């Protein structure tokens, strides 16, 4: 064996030791987090899919395999039309409302002037507050008898709408509160998009004689379209997961049973239908996965074109 | 809207006023500030209403006249709420869950992100993708299986039962990994040559120079843990172990009638104001953390 072979063997051994060392360091650092994620995120998703094939009462020791029975029941029940409609209306209204209002607020914030930094933080602040606390505050404001909104309406001679009893008004109420809580997020994201538009483009189009409206329509809005797309997807994802406000403002879910609230009510709202609830959760999960894939694919394309 | 402004005697024939003419300045200020003032008022007034109402007596609450200010600042509603639910205990529970949960989460995120960026390991990108994918799994989907597992292990009505399932962090790992990748490798290589092992490099170099990013992750985790509702609602049924949002639900259920609003507003103040204070002091980090990923690409 030449000395070169010996050296190579030593290097290889030392290299192998270092790799083994790195391997162990990686496991020591990353394994706890990965194990927690596997145990409490991946395992439940698979578990849920299995549960969704069972006719099973929460707390019962035995369950009956029903295959796709729960899915058939869910998609053919009269509840499905109700849940799908409520989910669609809630999602469309909250996403549309917070994006349009968010863009308007962002345009107002974009003019740099004293106080606009404070206004940006103030408008964002409801986004970080407890949905339960926010829901209670608005429950008091909306109260048809002693609420401040009813008081203001009375001053101009109008009766208060029956927010708590009428199912469609209850839905309108949670939509308004959800938009109030989330509009600041859309505003801050849109503001970042506005600030990324180069000033020289604005000057160029102004030289062409474009007024504010034409500048907005043919320059600002098109350049904001990646931001709009991002916001659209993320807002739909979070609206589909809205729970706190709906739960605290409408405990019975009259008029406000979105997919997620239906999944909660079926398992924990007194029915104890674990298998059926898992079915609704799985449908919701599938919806979220599809939306995320759309986002990833479209963003991927944009990166390639750049 | 500018008709009330007294005009200097400018010739009426002038087609366009000078950009800095008083009339234009006032118009600009008004048109720029009105939307801002309106937006801030819409956010602030409900919260102010909550704070003021939490001091009102039942007779001041059950009135059809709109009255802004309470007659006294006596904390009667807070005392009454504490008689219905263990208010201080709820506050303590929320604080414990938030501090312990957020601290562990941040530690896990730092370690995982360091391993992903600086330690050699096969298929690291695949592992990262697997961690990132958890961002699209809402906690609601894992609710039922996690409830069965944790309550089966005896975690119902315990702190660890509330904290454990939320500890694995995709968000924090993602945010810190993105930041660690921007750190200059030369510093770490120099430390390695000096004989510093991974642990020393992590603790003495990476963590100190990443303090702002770590603060961001910590603040977002704190806000999230404090507000978390669905999981504690399901896993806790003993009032002594409830967090504030869950305890408020109990308060809503046990109180009916119009005078309950005073108690409920006191409860809302307890859950909202601490976050509002933290947010006011550190809003830059919190907003940056919560809008991360959106602004970058």
Image: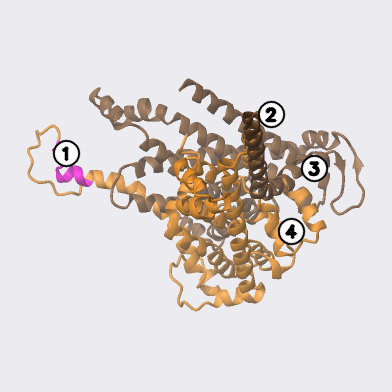
Chain colours: A brown, B orange
Q: CA gap, disc 2 to disc 3?
A: 58 Å
First of labels 2, 3 by sequence position: 2
Tell me the distance, in whole angstroms, between the alpha carbons under discs 1 and 4.
63 Å
Please indicate, yes or no, whether residue A180 appears anywhere in the rendered image: yes
Which residue was labeled with disc 4?
B235
Whole-angstrom CA distance, mark 1 to mark 2, is: 89 Å
Magenta segment boundaries in residue numbering: B17-26
Q: Is mark 4 on a helix, strand or loop?
A: helix
Numbered disc in front, either 3 or 1: 3
Alpha carbon separation for disc pair 4 and 2: 67 Å
Of circles 1 and 2, the one toward us is: 2
Task: Report the disc number at residue B19.
Answer: 1
Asked if residue B221 is among those painted magenta in the image, a careful observer would answer no
Same chain check for tags 2 and 3: yes
In the rendered image, residue B215, in percent from the top left (x then y), is placed at 49, 55
Residue B271 versus residue B150: which sits nearer the camera? B150
Chain for disc number 1: B
Q: Which of marks 1 and 4 is nearer the N terminus?
A: 1
User: Label 3 vs label 1: CA separation?
Assistant: 67 Å
Q: Which of marks 3 and 4 is in front?
A: 3
Q: Which chain carries label 4?
A: B
Q: Nearer the viewer, mark 2 or mark 3?
A: 2
């Amino acid at each position: 064996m030449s000395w070169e072979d010996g050296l190579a063997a030593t290097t290889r051994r030392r290299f192998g030791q270092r790799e083994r060392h790195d391997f162990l360091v990686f496991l020591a650092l990353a394994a706890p987090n990965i194990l927690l994620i596997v145990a409490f995120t991946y395992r439940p998703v698979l578990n849920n899919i299995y549960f969704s094939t069972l006719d099973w009462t929460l707390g019962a020791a035995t369950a009956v395999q029903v295959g796709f029975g729960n899915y058939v029941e869910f998609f053919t029940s009269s509840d499905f039309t109700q849940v799908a409609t409520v989910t669609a209306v809630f999602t469309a209204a909250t996403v549309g409302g917070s994006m349009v209002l968010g863009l308007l607020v962002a345009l107002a914030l974009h003019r740099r002037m004293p106080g606009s930094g404070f206004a940006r933080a103030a408008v964002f602040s409801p986004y970080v507050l407890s949905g339960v606390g926010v829901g209670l505050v608005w429950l008091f404001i909306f109260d048809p008898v002693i609420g401040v909104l009813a008081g203001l309406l009375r001053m101009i001679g109008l009766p208060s709408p029956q927010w708590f009893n009428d199912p469609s008004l209850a839905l309108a109420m949670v939509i308004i509160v959800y938009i109030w809580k989330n509009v600041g997020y859309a505003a801050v994201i849109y503001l970042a998009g506005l600030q990324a538009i180069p000033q020289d483009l604005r000057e160029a189009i102004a030289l062409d004689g474009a007024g504010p409206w034409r500048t907005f329509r043919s320059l600002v809005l098109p350049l904001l379209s990646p931001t709009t797309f991002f916001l659209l997807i993320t807002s739909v994802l979070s609206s589909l997961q809205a729970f706190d406000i709906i739960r605290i403002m409408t405990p019975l879910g009259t008029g406000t049973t979105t997919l997620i609230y239906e999944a909660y009510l079926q398992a924990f709202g007194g029915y104890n239908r674990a298998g059926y609830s898992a079915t609704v959760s799985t449908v919701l999960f599938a919806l979220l996965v599809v939306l995320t894939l759309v986002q990833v694919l479209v963003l991927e394309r944009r990166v390639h074109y750049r | 809207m500018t008709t009330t402004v007294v005009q200097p005697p400018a010739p009426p024939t002038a087609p366009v006023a000078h950009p800095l003419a008083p009339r234009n300045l006032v118009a600009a200020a008004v048109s720029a500030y009105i939307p801002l003032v309106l937006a801030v008022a819409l956010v602030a007034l409900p919260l102010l209403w909550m704070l003021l109402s939490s001091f009102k007596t039942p007779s001041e609450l059950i009135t059809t006249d709109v009255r802004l200010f309470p007659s006294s600042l006596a904390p009667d509603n807070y005392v009454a709420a504490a008689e219905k639910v263990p208010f201080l205990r709820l506050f303590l529970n929320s604080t414990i869950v938030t501090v312990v949960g957020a601290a562990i989460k941040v530690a896990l995120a730092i370690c995982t992100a360091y391993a992903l960026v600086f330690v050699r390991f096969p298929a690291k990108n695949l592992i990262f993708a697997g961690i990132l994918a958890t961002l699209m799994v809402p906690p609601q989907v894992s609710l039922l299986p996690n409830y069965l597992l944790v309550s089966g292990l005896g975690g119902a009505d315990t702190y660890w039962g509330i904290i454990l399932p939320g500890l694995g962090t995709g968000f924090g790992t993602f945010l810190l990994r993105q930041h660690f990748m921007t750190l200059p490798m030369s510093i770490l290589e120099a430390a390695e040559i000096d004989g510093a092992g991974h642990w020393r490099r992590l603790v003495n170099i990476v963590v100190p120079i990443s303090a702002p990013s770590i603060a961001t992750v910590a603040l977002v985790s704190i806000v999230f843990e404090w507000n978390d509702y669905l999981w504690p609602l399901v896993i806790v049924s003993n009032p002594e172990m409830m967090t504030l949002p869950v305890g408020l639900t109990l308060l809503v259920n046990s109180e009916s009638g119009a005078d309950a609003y005073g108690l409920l507003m006191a409860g809302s103040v307890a859950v909202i104001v601490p976050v509002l204070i933290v947010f006011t002091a550190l809003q830059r980090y919190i907003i940056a953390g919560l809008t991360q990923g959106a602004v970058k690409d």
